[in-house]
Image (tube, rainbow, N blue to C red):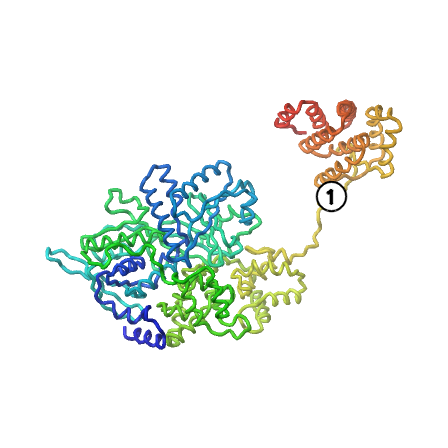
């Protein structure tokens, strides 16, 4: 342990840490205690606040397990309230009530890292509106005075305004309710730092090897401490304690078996996978809840740390130190996301920035007969050896769990605290004392930090952000003055690494995963920032080259194994359809583009390559290509991605990108049908009538002609059919229009007719109806029905109907004499019949299903 103590002692030279003890003092003080437990920052804070001499050891880093891999929500449990109501389960109701009270307390004691957060519940069925509205209002009612804000209903338009990525089809509206959101890893560290400032001895990277036991006056074995090992130095020593508390989450059973090998297992571990997507997938200030996925689970879709967090799954698993997400679970979450997002938003596998798995410590109550049923709340077990185990529960109720656990420990082990009652309710945590929502402005004004960086520091460290800012180095720029970023896309700065070491960060993984959340936000960005982080830590902790290399290798393994980088690589595996000689040729091309031997090329290099090879690709296409091929979103194409790109040019297809279509020759012929005109030989049997185009002069002459001689209007229905017969059969016009173009023309045509008198409109419309002989019955019926509505605008409707009837009869006889029969006639007669009905009967008749085919 001396090596680690000497390192820590050199670190605090000229530093004022009167309240936060250096790590070597904490390690050297782990000898005799009233309270000792392998994990549980909340329990440590509760016991030390009561005046008990307290120690805590964590095998890896604070929050290295499930605590940092949650959904980041502080919630009361809407689902539990639903079960409480429908099953009349009072225990479920009590659990919801307790969680809502603790939610309010957590937001009060750590306002810089916990805050009210709106969550939208989209509704796609009308019956869901009253159903979920009643449930959400009951949720508000149970919260009572601790309610964060009132829930409310949103119309479809308002929901889409607030959440424009939402699927519009069949959307009825949305409900918005409030829960809490927090930064889980930082919350755990803040609890530990607060406990240390109050006199507790907490040490990370210290493993429990075995439990110490003694025999009481009755000859029974009692747990009296533990033998531990420092994983950083390899040294071992013993810690004695009057009471040992097992608060190890998924590792609950491993500690219980140390106490008694015959203890039955009570932990039922379950894996929950989350994925991270770019921030454009969700609005910055509102989350989304899918209450019923395809397999009955719940999916959250939340903005977090300038990215979008989606999850979670729920699958039985084994307890492991290195939980890993699977591709199947990632694809499941992506599938559920697609169900709620607009089809315009392409949810791509390549957009997954990171993926991780956390192990839920679900437990069964050993005191109940049905040991297979899982306890939805926490349980406290006292073994024969006086080992106290706290298991189950969730982040929201951690404080209440700790309170009950310490109460039980005082009772069972006859401890004598200074304050017998719990003191943690309302106790402000580290960083909350002088925090205010406008604190970031002072950081900008006093230190010259970027606005985004200042907001990040204030919302992460609270009033401790000033200490971080004091450690920030000069940028050498006009603005910002201080605060060099670890990665240009994220607001983490180098000073945070130095400050994290003073909060007991011992490895690069501690920095990337818990002190910053860069590995959770973007695994690739974390890998890029890794060398600089290791350099800073080496400078602070006096690492050798071997220690630096070991940290880099360990961190890369962590990113690949636990943050989804291996999955990302696997998901981009596309067959390369090249021979060995062709691969060598493209490798040479890549090296020629990579002039600086960086191992990647940029969009400018691609642009030059396309130009050199005479491939005309627009700028828009280039950016789309980069979005699809560059799955890491770092504007860099490595040799593997380049080979996939070249393979796509050869085969015409590539997984998840449009490159092949962007560079494909677009000069192929377009079918004539798409141009709006169908050209072909005249066939009198197939198309008995063709489009007759009247000249503008003839068209304009019809109104004056009818007004000059009214008798022509009366004779028109009888003479006009024979006129058309003669005109169409002896002067055919050898082309006709396709359906889309005709529909567009007809729409404009009826608007145009409204400018003229009825006789002229009637005549032109009647000509137009004959073109319907080229179409099927449904469309003809639709146009005919609309036409009669058009005629209803004129006062002489009854006379018009009579005239049309005679015209129709004439044309019917004419069509019967020809070789073909068009569905136009049937639709025309049916429309005429419907137009003569009263409005109520007409509406009824419209809904009659007509299975007519010709």
Spot occupied by residue 529 in the image (x, y as percentages of width and height): 47, 68
Q: State the residue at coordinates (39%, 61%).
A: 432
Question: Of 292 and 571, which appears nearest the observer?
Answer: 292
> Would you call the spot at circle 1 few (<14 residues within 10 Å), some (14-19), or many (20 or more)?
some
Quarter holding residue 852: top right
Q: State the residue at coordinates (44%, 38%).
A: 134
Q: Is residue 69 visible?
A: yes
Quarter holding residue 558: bottom left
Q: State the residue at coordinates (58%, 73%).
A: 595
Question: Of 40 and 847, which appears nearest the observer?
Answer: 40
Question: Of 325 and 279, which appears nearest the observer?
Answer: 279
Question: Seen in the image, is 729 located left or right of residue 634?
Answer: right
Whether residue 637 is situated above or below residue 219 in the rendered picture: below
Q: State the residue at coordinates (86%, 29%).
A: 706
Question: Of 491 and 664, which appears nearest the observer?
Answer: 491
Question: Seen in the image, is 130 located left or right of residue 33?
Answer: right
Whether residue 469 is situated above or below residue 380 in the rendered picture: below
Tally the marks: 1
Spot occupied by residue 416 in the image (x, y as percentages of width and height): 20, 58
**Residue farthest right in this picture:** 708
Question: Seen in the image, is 245 located left or right of residue 719?
Answer: left
Q: Quadrant of the N terminus?
A: bottom left
> In what element is the residue under mark 1?
loop
Spot occupied by residue 544 in the image (x, y as percentages of width and height): 38, 77
Spot occupied by residue 466 in the image (x, y as percentages of width and height): 43, 68
Question: Seen in the image, is 616 located left or right of residue 317?
Answer: right
Q: Is residue 821 visible?
A: no
Q: Quadrant of the C terminus?
A: top right
Quarter holding residue 540: bottom left
Residue under label 1:
676
């Amino acid at each position: 342990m001396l090596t680690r103590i000497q390192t820590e002692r050199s670190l605090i030279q000229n530093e004022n840490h009167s309240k936060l003890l250096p790590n070597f003092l904490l390690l050297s003080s782990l000898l005799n205690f009233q309270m000792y437990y392998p994990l549980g920052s909340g329990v440590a804070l509760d016991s030390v606040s009561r005046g008990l001499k307290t120690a805590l050891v964590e095998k890896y880093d604070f929050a290295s397990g499930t605590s940092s891999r949650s959904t980041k929500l502080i919630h009361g449990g809407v689902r539990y309230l639903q079960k409480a109501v429908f099953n009349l389960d009072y225990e479920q109701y009590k659990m919801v009530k307790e969680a809502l009270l603790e939610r309010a307390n957590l937001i009060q004691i750590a306002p810089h890292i916990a805050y009210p957060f709106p969550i939208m519940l989209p509704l796609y069925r009308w019956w869901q509106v009253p159903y979920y509205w009643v449930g959400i209002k009951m949720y508000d009612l149970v919260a009572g005075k601790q309610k964060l804000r009132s829930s409310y209903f949103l119309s479809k338009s308002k929901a889409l305004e607030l959440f424009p990525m939402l699927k519009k089809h069949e959307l009825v509206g949305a409900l918005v309710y409030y829960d809490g959101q927090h930064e889980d890893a930082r919350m755990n560290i803040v609890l530990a730092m607060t406990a240390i400032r109050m006199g507790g001895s907490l040490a990370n990277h210290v493993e429990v090897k075995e439990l110490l036991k003694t025999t009481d006056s009755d000859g029974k074995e009692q747990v009296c401490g533990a033998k531990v090992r420092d994983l950083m130095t390899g040294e071992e020593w013993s810690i004695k304690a009057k009471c040992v508390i097992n608060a190890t989450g998924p590792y609950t059973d491993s500690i219980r078996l140390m106490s008694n090998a015959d203890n039955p297992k009570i932990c039922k571990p379950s894996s929950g996978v989350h994925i991270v997507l770019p921030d454009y997938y969700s609005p910055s200030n509102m989350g989304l809840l899918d209450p019923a996925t395809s397999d009955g689970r719940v999916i959250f879709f939340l903005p977090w740390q300038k990215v979008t967090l989606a999850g979670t799954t729920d699958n039985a698993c084994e307890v492991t130190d290195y939980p890993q997400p699977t591709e199947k679970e990632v694809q499941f979450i992506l599938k559920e996301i697609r169900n709620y997002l607009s089809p315009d938003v392409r949810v791509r596998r390549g957009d997954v920035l990171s993926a991780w798995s956390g192990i839920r410590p679900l437990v069964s109550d050993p005191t109940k007969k049905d040991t297979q049923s899982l306890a939805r709340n926490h349980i406290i077990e006292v073994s024969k050896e006086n080992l106290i185990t706290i298991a189950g529960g969730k982040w929201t109720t951690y404080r209440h769990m700790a309170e009950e656990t310490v109460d039980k420990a005082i009772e069972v082990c006859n401890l004598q605290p200074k304050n017998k009652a719990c003191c943690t309710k309302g106790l402000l945590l580290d960083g909350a004392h002088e925090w205010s929502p406008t604190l970031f402005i002072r950081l900008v004004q006093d230190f010259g930090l970027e606005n985004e960086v200042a907001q990040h520091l204030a919302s992460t460290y609270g009033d401790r952000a000033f200490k971080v800012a004091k450690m920030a180095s000069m940028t050498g720029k006009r603005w910002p003055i201080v605060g060099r970023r670890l990665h240009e896309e994220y607001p983490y700065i180098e000073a945070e690494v130095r400050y994290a070491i003073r909060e007991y960060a011992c490895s690069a993984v501690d920095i990337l995963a818990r002190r910053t959340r860069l590995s959770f936000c973007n695994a690739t960005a974390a890998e890029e920032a890794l060398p600089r982080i290791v350099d800073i830590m080496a400078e602070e902790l006096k690492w050798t080259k071997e220690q630096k290399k070991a940290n880099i290798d360990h961190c890369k393994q962590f990113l690949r194994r636990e943050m989804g980088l291996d999955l990302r690589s696997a998901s981009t595996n596309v067959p390369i359809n090249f021979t060995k000689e062709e691969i060598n040729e493209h490798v040479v091309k890549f090296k020629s583009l990579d002039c600086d031997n960086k191992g990647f090329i940029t969009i400018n290099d691609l642009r030059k390559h396309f130009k050199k090879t005479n491939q005309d690709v627009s700028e828009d296409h280039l950016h789309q290509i980069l979005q699809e091929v560059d799955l890491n979103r770092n504007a860099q194409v490595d040799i593997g991605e380049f080979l996939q790109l070249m393979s796509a040019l050869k085969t015409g297809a590539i997984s998840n990108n449009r490159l092949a279509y962007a560079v494909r020759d677009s000069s192929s012929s377009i079918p004539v049908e798409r141009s709006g005109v169908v050209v072909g030989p005249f066939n009198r049997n197939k198309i008995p009538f063709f489009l007759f185009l009247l000249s503008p002069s003839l068209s304009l002459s019809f109104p004056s002609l009818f007004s000059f001689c009214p008798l022509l209007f009366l004779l028109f229905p009888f003479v006009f059919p024979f006129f058309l017969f003669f005109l169409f059969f002896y002067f055919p016009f050898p082309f006709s229009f396709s359906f889309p173009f005709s529909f567009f023309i007809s729409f404009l045509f009826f608007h145009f007719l409204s400018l003229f008198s009825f006789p002229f409109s009637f005549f032109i419309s009647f000509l137009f109806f004959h073109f319907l002989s080229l179409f099927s019955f449904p469309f003809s019926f639709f146009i005919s029905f609309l036409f009669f509505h058009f005629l209803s605008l004129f006062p002489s409707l009854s006379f018009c109907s009579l005239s049309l009837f005679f015209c129709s009869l004439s044309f019917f006889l004419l069509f019967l004499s020809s070789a073909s029969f068009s569905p136009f006639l049937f639709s025309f007669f049916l429309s005429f019949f419907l137009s003569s009905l009263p409005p109520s009967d007409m509406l009824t008749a419209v809904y009659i299903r007509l299975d007519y085919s010709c």
